[in-house]
Image: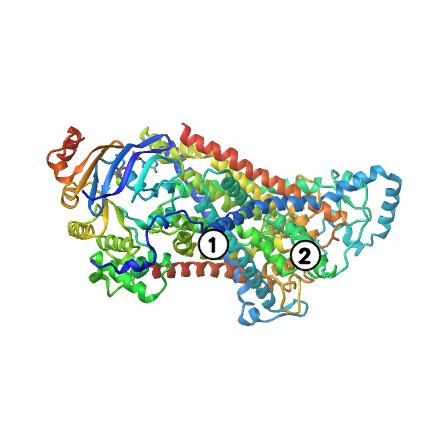
Amino acid sequence: MSKKNRITGALFVGTTAFSAFLIIAVIIILLVVIIIGGKDTFSWEFLTSFPQDGMMKGGIFPAIYGTALLVVIMSVAAVPFGTITAIYLTEYASETSILAQTIRFAVRTLATVPSIIFGLFGLGFFIKFVGGGMDDVFLGGQLKWGQPNILWASLTMSLLTLPVVIVSVEEAIRTVPREMREASLALGATKWETIRRIVIPGSRSGIMTGTILAVSRGAGEVAPILFTGAAYYLATLPTSLSDQFMNLGYHIYIMATQSANVDQTLPIQFATTLVLLMLTFMLNLTAVIIRSRLRRKAK
Amino acid sequence: MDNPIENTGFVFSKESLRKKFRWSEFFSEKIITGVAFLSITIIVLIFFFVFRETLPIFHQKKETKKIESVQKQEQYNGEETSVAKNSAGQEQYGVITKDTLMMENQVPGEDTIVRGSDEATVKSLLGKEWLPVSDRPRYGLVPLLVGTLKITLLAILFAAPIAILAALFSAAFAPHWMREIIKPAIELLAGFPSVVIGFFALMVMASFFQNIFGYDTRLNAFVGGVAMALAAIPIIYTITEDALTAVPRSYTEASLALGASRWQTALFVTLPAATPGIFAAILLGIGRVFGETMIALMATGNAAMISVNPFESVRTLAATIGAEMAEVVFGDTHYSVLFLIGSLLFIFTFCLNALAEFYVKGRLVKRFQGK
Amino acid sequence: MKQPKIQIRDLTLFYGEKMALNSISMEIPEKEVTAFIGPSGCGKSTFLRTLNRMNDLIPNVRITGEVLVDSLNIYDKQIDVVNLRKKVGMVFQKSNPFTKSIYENVAYGPKINGIHDRKKLEVIVETSLQKAFIWEEVKDRLHDSAMGLSGGQQQRMCIARALAVNPEIILMDEPASALDPISTAKIEELIFELKKNYTIVIVTHNMQQAARVSDLTAFFYLGELVEYGKTRKIFTTPDKKQTEDYITGRFG
Ligand SMILES: Nc1ncnc2c1ncn2[C@@H]1O[C@H](COP(=O)(O)OP(=O)(O)OP(=O)(O)O)[C@@H](O)[C@H]1O
Ligand SMILES: [Mg+2]
């Protein structure tokens, strides 16, 4: 091979390697900058106390609490529905049926719909249509459910995370060997018994992983809750489904763009961002631990 | 041998082999199928409810024709009753200020503006001014559309080459251990909340680039584009990598057998063979950037202006919804126009997804199986 | 000759457009061992799976003809496939324990049949494991995962699991093909013991095995039943040239 050719090759491979390392470098810089920026403010105190002085000081406990509540309600809605959809796609639908293909297309579409659209849908459907309808029917028009609250925000978020659950549960179900299903059926189990006793237990770790991925997605998304329930500041924690709530991501957004003195609260902003990043990280860590424990137990 | 298992309670007979109706089977199947329909239902509902809220805009048009004189009167009244909450804040959307951070003057809790309907709405949609909270509101979508396209173009220009080259590196050149680091790391990036990327762009990248390029507006399309690229890179990278690794070995082996080197094979055989997949990757990357809200809100400056200069602020469609929806009155014209923007976003991303799905996937399959 | 347990009449099976079984008719007697032999791909497994309708699970399968078990056509619309499979049990080529404990594996079938009484289940599990000659090996580790057993033990546990449902017929698809000679010998011994109480149909590639364990042998070739008769006759004086060629190993 000619020398010129070899140089071109080296240059080309070098460019591809450079691109890969550039991405990695940006990820590292991002992490490091946020850790450095937030580490001084970050403390137990910061995590457990309320904001003070018009959010110029104090902690972010209500935002953490609101985010946790949001993802819990969201999971309660998204995980069972996502799991059942995955079961349908793998166990009941024939791969070529039009219905199954339409569902798959819908799931993929759902995964690519911009998150702000979910916010609009939450507003138009949950708040105005369902909530407003509930107020009209049960409360004689008195405004209670027809306004943003944690329930509507969580349900909106669950639509967004539904595909995440479906995809990872489906993947897990497909790893349950066909031989095991056949063994169960050959023993005289019905289809549903086989699903309930063999398929679902066999994909437990996938359901767990799907839940955790959905939670970490739901904890970080802000656009869907901008106008479906997140609040700028609340002096008390939400106690009912019809209450508004504070949220980590929303808090970051508000503090960084709308607070009276952005520079003064900069450490708080960095620390809040650090908390959100750590939360995502810890969720993934938990996923790994649960999965390995499940596998050990199966052995 | 005696058989204690016989007391299993199940005795074989003609009777026991007769077909049984099992309620649990019946209900489980019905419920599971019903739930599976949910995904389709949600898509249909999104279509329906997002469009439904835009309808008032077009209703007004009809009314205008019918009772024009009355309408004019109303319109006049409407203008009078529209009380500005903050006269300084009103025109801000159209103006670039030095401190773009404070562009959105949304102090929650303040009264929102009530405005009457006006006939000019529909006509103004094609205008060049986005001034939804002025005395005479104008809802020109052109600057928002231009802003969105501009930032999408910038973001994809940054993201696509880097992501595709990186995918080529990890699919074709990287040693195994390196690949085991690069892939998960980029997937980690996909897991970063966009508000975190937006925050990083706002607080760190904006100043960093300003020092380098010395532009005036700290938050602009360039900063926003780079930040959006961070969100698009994982998508483009992952799908491209999949497409590259899906290229049959026979392709590359044939090329290597002809004496081509590894990089030549990668560049002239593997990469072209994977083009439909890469095309899909770019389409989905575009969809992601087009609809991204938080990064746009935080890093682009949010001024609705038409300009080709990448260092000017822009206001995207998604960011407009995000910034203004919390302010408007339910059912107001402004409200409906924001839903109209949402419908546009939805239709656009839906088409992108469908295109990537039907066209590109079909071609990929044909290419590898039909030949 | 005992009364036939299974009668197959003119059974034809298609996978899509491809014919896998061509008009097969035969009778399988009760409480004897019938072996299916033939070159790979000739349809032995397919045929075996038609006997408890496991082929129903595969899309695009078309079946015509009749299979009568105790003179009931199991392809009749009125037949309950779930209960049929309790009567016609199956052991697969690759041992396929559930990722559960040994106890849970064996108790799976009885539990499905609505037995939840602990005492009863324990008796069933123990008897089944004893019948499969594996009780002594596992009695101290019943609650350990079945995945921890050796291949041969797993296969015998799978047989025990099938026995726990109290079937009348047991179908075995190459049950010893993946096992070492000692485990194979144990399985063969087990089959010999089981035929006192069960009707057994076994697919095997191993000529010696067929000769050792079976009373009757059926030779299949390209989806057709070529020859069927007493094992001794098939192995000593087959009627058809093809059978002789296959048995003596002159086959391609
Ligand atoms: N699910 C299926 N779909 C389509 N064709 C199939 C399927 N299963 C089997 N076949 C085909 O049917 C024929 C018979 O297969 P079968 O598995 O019954 O053979 P076999 O005699 O058991 O072979 P072996 O000894 O290798 O197990 C083969 O040609 C096979 O390719
Ligand atoms: Mg076979």
Give the residue drawn at x 70%, y 54%: B104
Badge 1: residue crowd in 10 Å (few <14, some 14–19, many ≥20): many
Three-letter code for the amino acid on which mark 2 is drawn = Gly
Q: Are marks 1 and 2 on the same chain?
A: yes
Compare marks 1 and 2 and give the one earlier in the sequence.
2
Which of discs 1 and 2 lies nearer the camera? The answer is: 2
* Residue A19 position (above or below residue A165): above
Q: Quadrant of ligand 2?
A: top left
Image side of residue B136 versus residue A290, left or right: right
Q: Nearer the viewer, residue B108 or A162?
A: A162
Q: Position of residue A56 (x, y in %)?
A: 65, 67
Mark sitting on residue A210: 1
Tell me where residue B169 appears, x and y as whole percent: 42, 42
Check disc 1 and give the amino acid type: Gly
Q: Is residue C180 visible?
A: yes
Q: Which mark is residue A131?
A: 2
Residue C16, how many percent across, how many down? 38, 32
Q: Chain of mark 1?
A: A
Residue drawn at the location 20% of the way across and 46% of the way down:
C32
Q: Chain of mark 2?
A: A
Check mark 2 vs ligand 1: CB closer than 8 Å? yes or no. no
Task: Please state which of residues B195 and A155 is positioned toward the viewer in this rendering.
Answer: A155
Residue farthest to the left, as pictured: C236
**Picture quarter with the N terminus of chain C:** top left
Label 2 residue SS: helix
Q: Where does residue B360 sit, x and y in percent of width and height? A: 50, 34
Q: Residues within 10 Å of mark 2 (few under 14, many from 20)?
A: many
Distance Cα–Cα, label 1 vs label 2: 29 Å
Compared with residue B18, is residue A263 higher up or lower down, i.e. above or below?
below
State the mark number for residue A93.
none
Residue A11 position by quadrant: top left
